[in-house]
Image (tube, coloured by chain):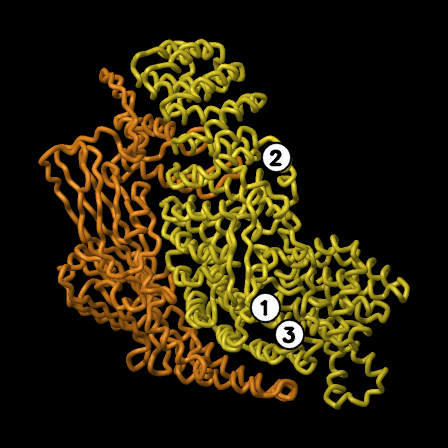
Chain colours: A yellow, B orange
Amino acid sequence: MAKGKNAAEFFADVIKNVASNSLETRKLVYIYLLRYADFEPDLALLSINTIQKSLSDQNPVIRALAVRVISALRLPVIAPIVQLAIKQCCNDLSPTVRRATVQAIGKCYDLDPSTGTNLIESLTKMLSDRDPLVLSSALVTLGKYFPDRLDLLHRPFRNICRILPQLDEWSQVVVLELLTRYSRIYLAKPRVFASNGRSSELKQVEDEDIFGASDTPEDGQRSVVLDPDMELLFKSASALLFSRNGAVILAVAKLYFYLGTRETFSELEVAEPVVRLLRSDSSVQYIALMNIRTMAMTRTKSFVPFLPYFHVLPSDNAVITKLKLEILTLLVDEKTVDTVLSDIKFYATTSNNPKVVANAMQALARCALSFPSHSRRILAWLFHQIGCEKPIVVSETLTSIRVLIQNDPTNHISTVARLAACLDQDLVANAKASIIWLVGEFAGLAYEITPDVFRKCTKTFALEDENVRYQIIVLAAKIYSYHLDRQKSTEMSEETETDLRNRRSNEVIPKLFSHVMHLARYDSSYDIRDRARMFSALLNSSINNDIAFLVLQAPKPLPIISIKEKLLGLESDQKASLNSTPIGRLHLGSVSLILGHSVDGYQQLPSWTPVDHLIDPSIRDEEENKEDGITPFSNTTKQYRQSPPITSLSSKTYREPESHGLRTNGKRLTQQTLDEFLGDVKVASEHGDESEESEESEESEESDEDESEGDGSDESNEGDSNEDVSASEQDGENEEQESDSSNDETSRMIR
Amino acid sequence: MVFMLPCTSQMPVMVPFEFINRFAEVLEKYFTPPVVPMRIETNLDVVSLLLNEMLDDGYPYVTEPDALRDLVPNGGLLSKLLSGGNKTVPTQSTIPWRRSNVRHTNNELFVDIVETLYMVLPAKPSNSLSGRRVSEPIGSSALYSHSSQPNSAYYSTRPLVSRIEGTIFVTSNLSGIPEISLNLNTLNNHLGRPSFHPAVKIDKWVQSPGTLQFIPPDGKALIASYTLDNNRVGGKNEKNRAQGQGLVFAEFRTGLGIAKDEFEARVWTTMSREVKHVEGLSVNVICDGQRTKKNIKGLRITSGDFHFNDWGIGEWTFPGKTPLGWSASLRGALEREEVDDEEDESEENSKSNGVEDSIGDSFRDATGSSHKSKALDSNVASKESGSGIKPIFPTHLSITYTLTGNVPSGIKVNSLRILKSPGLGEGVKPFKGLRYTTNVGEYIVR
């Protein structure tokens, strides 16, 4: 049977032995019975009688076995019998039997949910059992089958807290989870008082959201006032940090993370056991790192001492390396930044796993952004890497440089120039294409360099790869559009300021443009031919010019680089459209966190109950005479359970790209200052409230395209966006602002 | 072995993984390791019985190996049944992790302390501008040296990662229900929060760190595991850093010789009173990890065998036992596969000059020349240092060895006492043994 062969034909013969005197025989028969009862329910019923008899056997082992078997027989007919058995064995003297009975409660409920009320009665009895193992099983059953009946925990709460370290380690996991939820609903939230140093009076710090916590200043005395029951829970749970079971440790960490404040978290050194999980095999490491990443975002201080644990070892695989690098950049501070940087550089240059290189480069960019003092050095280093031999290093380097530049365009004009100089080296096609693209983005800002780059690219146009050629065309179109722009403005302002050189280049640009377009028209790739035709049509007729400006001069969304933002979903990335909870907010230790989206049965933690709604703590007193403190409150439980999951507004608000410098849009915006522009955007977004949802979904599409450097898929969008734009352009004068913002959207989409 | 874990509902994610680990542990107890597929196939009945007990209602039920041993006899039920079967009914013991009625003719108690070393030594700053790794811009970092140099010098002297992962195994072959007290001399090391077997009394440890008191499970069991971080930022172990690096040291230098294309690896061992020799010492010279054949020209080694394996990793092994107070070195230059590199270099050179001319004018006007000139400087610097050809070097060394008799942290067992031993019998003096073993997890010298 164990080998997977079907042994159903012997059913009757085997069942006959159910009354055998030998325990071993009986056990084997039971196993057989459980396996094949579904095939012959009628025959299986015959054995019930014997099993029932053995419920009152002398030997507790046999009794326990009988309870187990009778409840595990998946025959709906016998539900009442099982119930009877449960009732009978609830009061058994042997803890083994009681434990098996508790297990049976769950199975019986599964078999016939209508028996629920009776079963809960027995379960309540078991929850106040003195034997830790019985209690363990009772709590597991509660957590699995009646997760909403947290009110059952009122009376045993303190006992459970005290006995917690003695429970079975598997059930500890469930219990900790239950208690976390229980405390969120029924216990007062720890109040944090902070004194500002000057005034001695304590001021209660306002509600700190788990994820907003890092914003509050860390200095100054803070004292925490805990509910006495919470204190008890914290104290007993701290013993579990010594557990050898990783699941327990994660559950404890979760408890402190969601219930405790920053102080409790660091006082009890919760971080250490969690970090210790990294000793285990790679799958456990992966889970631990995922959880650490979430915790490190707000409890950064607690994890900083463990920085060396996140250095990548050569034996780590790509996934773990990625997580470790992310955590490293989360934890790095002024003191350690040098070590970490040199370490990351080492990975970036020596690894030959492209993913590792990409992640290391990204990490470098993150470091550069968070430590402005080091960003120059990092940039210099990145530049040096462009000449590297490995193509993968080069392309990742360029991606990082692009990220850095896009985050602060105005200060990086010189960087772009240096990049442009690199074009003359022998580069990989992709690298070349992305440099050209980047230069094109600066066409409006640094019009002194870009035409020259363009000129040089034109020379070798025919020799380049397809995507390089495409980027050259785009560059041509961008430069030309800015050129037309300037021409217009100079016409208006009587060309007093335009110096000589500008004029000279102004004469050259149209020629160069038409030359490239001419070249592209006879390109071997139909894609490039099409695009060239599109651009020349757009730019050569004055009617379409406005559209062309929108298409070519639209600001690009910032690549998401900060881990915090990525995980908390402040930006609406691709995943946001699929699932509502960003990965950083999925709670610790859950399957959902690991998979990155919520799975079936995922429950957000209930939010804290406000203080004035709390139930009298006397409900947890252990006096025996307090018979019925439970029922009146079950209502409130429901109410709080159904409260929507915590979603902060900030996750919905759509973040405008800060690359305003790149945007010298059309006639109106060129004259605007940054502030004016910002104001504009705000008004526009208020105006266009109803369009916000669509905006978000569009955003997600864009970020896709942004990755691929805009070489695919924009063709398809072209048609409808044209309509959009022309429609909005017919709007009246007073609605100009709104139409502007929607124009921006469409144009960004096209990009 | 690869496990698949289909999951139907939300559950604490760590549970299945931990369970699998535990299951593997139990299997090892039942079938003497190594557990090969053959052995599992022939004993499938036992495996299914075990699973039957270990899981109930889709959740781990009884997972303690000792408790399972009561429920599922070693040979499997079937064999027992066929051989007539005894009618004794097992009773469940009150201590979940210890079997009832343990009987041994030889009463023995062993403690194994095994420590695994994890070290990553960063590269030492080189004296000349020649640069150890040419891919790193020595030139550009020298440019900004006023800010960076002192720091990096400071950091390079200490290992990047230096930690010891220790485990304490207790093998108990004692009859009855003995209670054992194990006192460790931790040498003021901060053991942090070790993880314990459920048998260990945690309150005792909290009261007096270093004292483990427990009723051991029968047979070999992992009692405690701890981590010592010699490098902990702001930790208490700052002073002890010198110790805790084991007995084997290594050094790795590049950019040597006339052509500055040679590298040298040196390994040496220090003296210790407790240890006589190091076993299985081997140094892997890891190039860029690409699976291509490599060659070393001008190879000079003082001892040991050196050859490249199929993975492009140079293995430098010292078979057998290596004495202490010994050293060896390996020197050579790595041969390049591509020859066309020189051309690239010169092309680059001419081209970069060209850029300077062509866009220089407009460029300088636009942005100011400060940045550009710096870039140029660094360019020149690296040119000079590289002297035309970029030599390639192995990226790092990785060292493995084992030794017995000492652990790097210096932790010692002060005393091992049997406090109570009901059921051991009068006048029985159990044999006690101690063993210290050091392993290497990762020892990387860059």
Disc 2 target residue: A633
Residue type (three-letter) at the residue carrying disc 1: Val
The quarter holding residue B373 reads bottom right
Quarter location, residue A112: top right
Q: Is residue A251 visible?
A: no
Residue under pointer 3: A409
Q: Position of residue B137 (x, y in %)?
A: 44, 77
Which residue has dot 1 on it? A403
Q: Chain of mark 2?
A: A
Q: Is residue A648 left or right of residue B11?
A: right
Q: Identify which residue is drawn at 36% across, 23% down.
A: A94
Q: What is the secondary structure assignment of the residue under circle 3? A: helix
As drawn, the label of residue A505 is none
Give the mark nearer the N terminus: 3 vs 2. 3
Residue B193: percent from left, percent from top? 35, 53
On the same chain: label 1 and label 2?
yes
For the residue pair A77 and B256, the one nearer the viewer reads as A77
Q: Residues within 10 Å of mark 1 (few under 14, many from 20)?
A: many
Pointer 1 with pointer 3, Cβ within 8 A: no
Q: Amino acid at mark 3?
A: Pro
Chain letter of mark 3 equals: A
